Amino acid sequence: MSGGAAPSSAVAGRSALLRWGMPRDPAASRHVAAFLVATVATVLLTRAFLAAAGYPQIGGGGLHVAHVLWGGLLMALAFVLLLSFAGPVVRPLGALVGGIGFGLFIDEIGKFVTSDNDYFYEPTAALIYVTVVALVILAEALHGRRPHRPEEYLAGAADHAVSGLTGGFTPRAREEAHGLLERAGDVRGAAQVRRLLDEIEEDHAELPNVVDRGAGLVVRGFRRLVTARWVPWVTVGALLLATGGAVLQGLLAWFGGTDVPAWMLLALAGSAGVSTAIALLGLAVVRRDRARAYRLFRRAVLVSLLVTQVFVFRLQEWAATAGLLVDLVVLGLVVAELSQIEAAAARREAAVKEAEARGESDRPAGAASDGGPQVR
């Protein structure tokens, strides 16, 4: 064991990652999502371009410069960017460059797993999908299962100050930094970070954040939809359409003579049934507990994304992207609604605390906490 004084009780009670100096970035979910979207879009666009161009090859004289090399170079560039600059400004750019590079890299997975370097290896689509799903599960485990601690919001606000100390704050950046600070509350160090943020000068020059702008457009579009009462029905209907289509594709492949193992068809039908049952349960409780209903919808979509669609991609390869797109749109609707519900709950909680604080300040000296006289 290392020497030195024992940590304070507050520090000792924190998770190992926090004690190691590894707070989670409050914006990490957006960056990971941008990385994965860029990966999938790059794979689809690359396949479409190569098919339209007749699969050209760069090189000659026995040399072939595969696009996996360009992918590796872009991933290396993303690492260099992320390792070279402090603060949050460079991370969206790193996520996009790294996602494009990883898409070019993973698109040639067929060459990695076959002895004859077969780019057209049949299960390629399923392998790519499983890889993306594994990254989604990892991101969910890191950022989706446990809420951020106040210290992590404070670290996020201080991280914004790092870029502001040299480049100043745009109004948007200042608002975002103060928003993180407000969510941190009155933890130790918050007052000092607040004073630091207030000292940063204003400057309207900033690197465009493509990730935030794109995410803002999507979220605003979804939130216009989720205000309607019919959205739960549309959500369940779209999910049933996707799962029903998946089962239908499996049956058509089976009766069409495709070499489909019986266990795969049973697993496809079983996962579709579980997803449907969870979605219908959510629809049954949506009127009395909207938050619980949308959490159930989210689980139903994740079962479809993480299990059902994997089998569909194995059966139909690239033609199965329609079901994937439907699931992603439904997941966007559900996440947008959950964010509204959680924001409303946070506002109610803040209003209650403010009312309690006003009640404490207005209470006469010597009054008990319930408004009555002190009894000793």
Image (cartoon, rainbow, N blue to C red):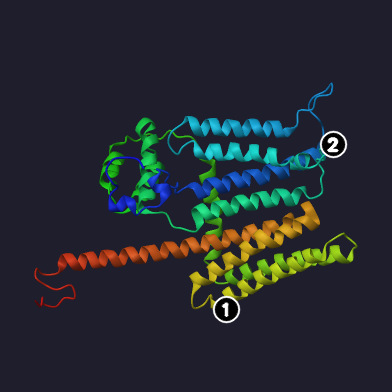
Residue lying at the far right in this picture: please name it: 257
Question: Which residue appears at 82% of the width and 32% of the height?
Answer: 56
Q: State the image coordinates of residue 257 (x, y, percent, origin top left).
A: 90, 62
Q: Is residue 213 visible?
A: no
Amino acid identity at mark 1:
Ala
Quadrant where the N terminus sits is top left
Q: State the image coordinates of residue 58 (x, y, percent, origin top left).
A: 78, 27
Q: Is residue 198 visible?
A: yes
Q: Is residue 147 left or right of 178 when viewed as pictured? A: right
The number of numbered badges drawn on the structure is: 2
Tag 2 residue? 54
Q: Residues within 10 Å of mark 2 (few under 14, many from 20)?
A: few
Q: Nearer the viewer, residue 65 or 263?
A: 263
Tag 1 residue? 284
Q: State the image coordinates of residue 199 (x, y, percent, origin top left).
A: 28, 37
* Residue 61 versus residue 66 in the image, above or below: above
Q: State the image coordinates of residue 195 (x, y, percent, origin top left).
A: 26, 41
Amino acid identity at mark 2:
Gly
* Residue 180 versus residue 272 in the image, above or below: above
Question: Which residue appears at 43% of the width and 44% of the height?
Answer: 22
Q: Residues within 10 Å of mark 1 (few under 14, many from 20)?
A: few
Q: Secondary structure at mark 2?
A: loop
